[in-house]
Every structure is written in structure tokens, then in C-alpha cells.
Image: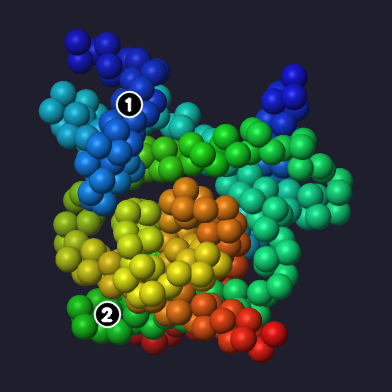
């Protein structure tokens, strides 16, 4: 039984999509925010691998074809962005200032909390790229001589949190304007947050994709200054 | 046929993004170059919306699923993470919350003020 799964090319994708569907079903039925489809898929998949004692490598052997689509799908985010171009032009200053304030806040919070947790320089620079999209984050972490694997982990935890709780956070802080929501979610939690913003609405999704690109670029600039602080 | 062309256009742009990523020595991923290329092509009319729309929107609708493999990979990094897991989670959560509050509030504030002026 175990061998069938380990040698199958379709096990990885099958279990990922299947558990994701389970997550969508649970969310619809129970309407509790912790039943986020992505979170359900991740925990149930991990649990299944552990129970059946299947190595991550055998799972990834098939599942990598899902990640393969990540680049084309991110490219496609230009479509809603184009459709919302008028909104973007009309509110250009607000959007840019909003993203910049978010980037500075990210770097400042990490700096303050790194002091609180007495992190070393390497641990500190490892976390600086945590709010930006994985590919830029990896490059930046390498550039700063951080632990790249941990940077990726922090990026995923951040993205997952933005995906699960992003719109609840917006509601909590009284952020109702679709553009503001999109900027907030995209700046805070990159493409994983954007995936959720896309489900909230077209404007939210488009502004979130824009924020991912702009915040990524700004973070690269900002981190080079912030790296000197610890 | 229509979807085949749409898919090919998106993949070709991804390829161009990949090339730029190799040529330009900046930590900018292929996908972000690709997004900029497609956006520019749409704005200048080189590519029409109808040439990418359905396939693009389909890809976007299944985007969340594409993060599952990487996140399941956290399983393998457990040993590296154990040491500073508390700091890692605390910093991730606190900064996400503060960033959503600050950038959302500022964006909304400027938009509202501008709307009042009009």
C-alpha cells in the first residue's frame, strides 16, 4: 500500500487537491474562520504523510506540478490589475503611501521584536524578508546572509496568517474601502494573502497583487538599511 | 483552441520573465517580471484582454492550492525551526497584524480625504 503512494506521480496532487476540497466543504458547512481551505489542506496532508509514514520527498515528487503553475498564475494577476487600472490611477498616491507605510512598519516591528527576543544578527536578517513573496524573499535572504530555509518558513507562516485572518483583521480595524483592504492584505502577506483577497473582490485582489510587487521592491531597498541596526 | 492560445501566451510571458530573471542581477522573481510584462502589454494593446482572460482567471482561481506543497514542506524544516519557533511565530503574527492595521488605515485615510475634497 505504502509503496503505491510513494511511487505514484498523482498521489501528491491528489491528496493536496482532495484535502483542499475538504477544506472548502468544511468552510461552507461550519463557517468558522479556522477552517480555512489552505490551512485544512496543509494540516490534513501533513497528518496523512505522518500516519502513513510517507517521506516528504515522495509526496513532493508529484505535488511539485502544483507549484509549477505558481509563476504563470502570478503573471496572470496582471489581468485584474489591468481591469482596475482606472481605480489605480485615481488613487495612486494613497496606494503608494499605504504600501510604503506598510513596508516600514514590517521592518520596524521585526527590528523591535528582534531586540525583545534577543535575536542574533543572522536570525534578525533572516526575518526581514518575511512579508514579501517567496522568490524575492529567498534572493534577499541570500543577499543578507540569512538562513534561507527559515526565511521561507517565516514567509509561509505570514502568508498563511494573512490568508486565514486578513479580512477579519481589516474588519477589526475598520478598514472597509476595497482599495485599502487590498493594499493592507497584499503588503502584509504577499501572494498567499492575495489569493484570499482575490476571493473577497476584484478590486481587493488587483490592489493586493500590485502591493505584492511594489512592497517586494521597497522591502529590498529598506532591508539593506535595516540590516545594519542589529 | 482559444484556451490553448491563452495558455501559451501566459507561459511565453513566464518564459520571458525567467529570461529577465537570469539576465538582470536583482533578486526579482520571474513571476514579478512576467506580471509587469503582461500588464504593460495589456496597457499598450499588444495583447488584448480576450487573449488571456479565461485561462488567466482560471489560474488565479486555483492559486491558493499552489502553496500547499511548499507549506507541507515545513514538515522537513522542523529541526531548523525548533530553536526559535516562538520568536518566529510571534514576530510573524505581530508584524502581519500591525502592517494590515497601519497600511490599511493610511490608504483608507488618504482616499477618504481626497473624496471629501472633491
Mark 2: few/some/many CA within 10 Å (<14, 14-19, 20+): some
Rendering coords of residue B95 (x, y %)? 33, 73
- Which chain letter matches label 1? A
Q: Earlier in the sequence, mark 1 or mark 2?
A: 1
Quarter in which the N terminus of chain B is drawn: top right
Q: Is residue A98 above or below residue A18?
A: below
Q: Can the viewer see residue A155 in this picture?
A: no
Tell me the CA gap for discs 1 and 2. 38 Å
Quarter in which the C terminus of chain B is drawn: bottom right
Rendering coords of residue B103 (x, y %)? 47, 76
Report the residue at 68% width, 30% height from top.
Answer: B7
Q: Nearer the viewer, mark 1 or mark 2?
A: 1
Q: Is residue A179 above or below residue B82?
A: below
Front residue of A34 and A131: A34
Front residue of B69 and A165: A165
Report the residue at 45% width, 69% height from top.
Answer: A176
Q: Can the viewer see residue A86 in this picture?
A: yes
Front residue of A158 and A227: A158
Q: What residue sits right under mark 2 in the picture?
A: A113
- Which chain letter matches label 2? A
Please, which colouring scheme is shown? rainbow
Which numbered marker is on residue A18?
Answer: 1
The kind of secondary structure element at disc 2 is helix
Rendering coords of residue B12 (x, y %)? 73, 36
Rendering coords of residue A204 (x, y %)? 53, 59
Q: Is residue A101 above or below residue B55?
A: below
Amino acid at each position: 500500500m505504502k509503496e503505491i503512494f510513494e511511487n505514484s506521480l498523482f498521489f501528491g496532487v491528489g491528496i493536496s487537491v482532495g484535502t483542499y476540497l475538504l477544506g472548502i466543504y468544511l468552510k461552507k458547512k461550519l463557517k468558522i474562520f479556522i477552517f480555512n481551505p489552505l490551512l485544512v489542506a496543509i494540516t490534513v496532508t501533513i497528518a496523512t504523510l505522518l500516519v502513513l509514514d510517507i517521506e516528504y520527498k515522495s509526496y513532493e515528487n508529484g505535488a511539485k506540478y502544483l507549484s509549477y503553475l505558481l509563476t504563470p498564475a502570478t503573471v496572470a494577476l496582471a489581468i485584474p490589475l489591468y481591469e482596475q487600472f482606472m481605480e489605480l490611477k485615481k488613487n495612486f498616491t494613497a496606494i503608494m503611501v499605504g504600501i510604503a507605510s506598510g513596508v516600514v512598519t514590517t521592518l520596524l516591528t521585526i527590528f523591535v521584536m528582534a531586540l525583545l527576543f534577543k535575536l542574533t544578527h543572522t536570525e534578525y536578517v533572516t526575518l526581514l524578508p518575511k512579508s514579501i513573496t517567496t522568490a524575492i524573499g529567498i534572493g534577499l535572504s541570500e543577499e543578507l546572509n540569512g538562513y534561507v530555509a527559515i526565511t521561507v518558513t517565516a514567509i509561509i507562516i505570514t502568508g498563511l496568517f494573512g490568508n486565514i485572518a486578513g479580512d477579519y483583521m481589516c474588519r477589526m480595524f475598520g478598514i472597509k474601502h476595497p482599495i485599502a483592504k487590498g493594499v493592507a492584505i497584499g503588503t502584509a502577506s504577499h501572494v498567499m494573502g492575495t489569493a484570499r483577497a482575490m476571493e473577497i473582490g476584484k478590486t481587493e485582489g488587483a490592489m493586493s497583487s500590485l502591493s505584492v510587487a511594489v512592497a517586494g521592491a521597497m522591502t529590498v531597498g529598506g532591508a539593506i538599511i535595516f540590516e545594519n541596526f542589529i | 483552441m482559444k484556451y490553448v492560445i491563452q495558455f501559451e501566451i501566459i507561459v511565453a510571458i513566464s518564459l520571458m520573465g525567467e529570461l529577465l530573471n537570469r539576465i538582470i542581477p536583482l533578486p526579482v522573481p520571474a513571476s514579478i517580471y512576467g506580471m509587469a510584462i503582461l500588464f504593460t502589454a495589456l496597457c499598450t494593446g499588444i495583447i488584448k484582454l480576450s487573449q488571456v482572460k479565461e485561462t488567466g482567471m482560471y489560474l488565479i482561481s486555483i492559486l491558493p492550492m499552489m502553496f500547499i506543497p511548499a507549506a507541507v514542506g515545513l514538515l522537513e524544516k522542523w529541526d531548523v525551526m525548533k530553536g526559535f519557533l516562538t520568536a518566529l511565530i510571534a514576530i510573524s503574527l505581530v508584524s502581519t497584524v500591525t502592517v494590515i492595521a497601519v497600511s490599511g488605515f493610511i490608504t483608507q485615510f488618504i482616499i477618504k480625504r481626497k473624496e471629501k475634497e472633491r
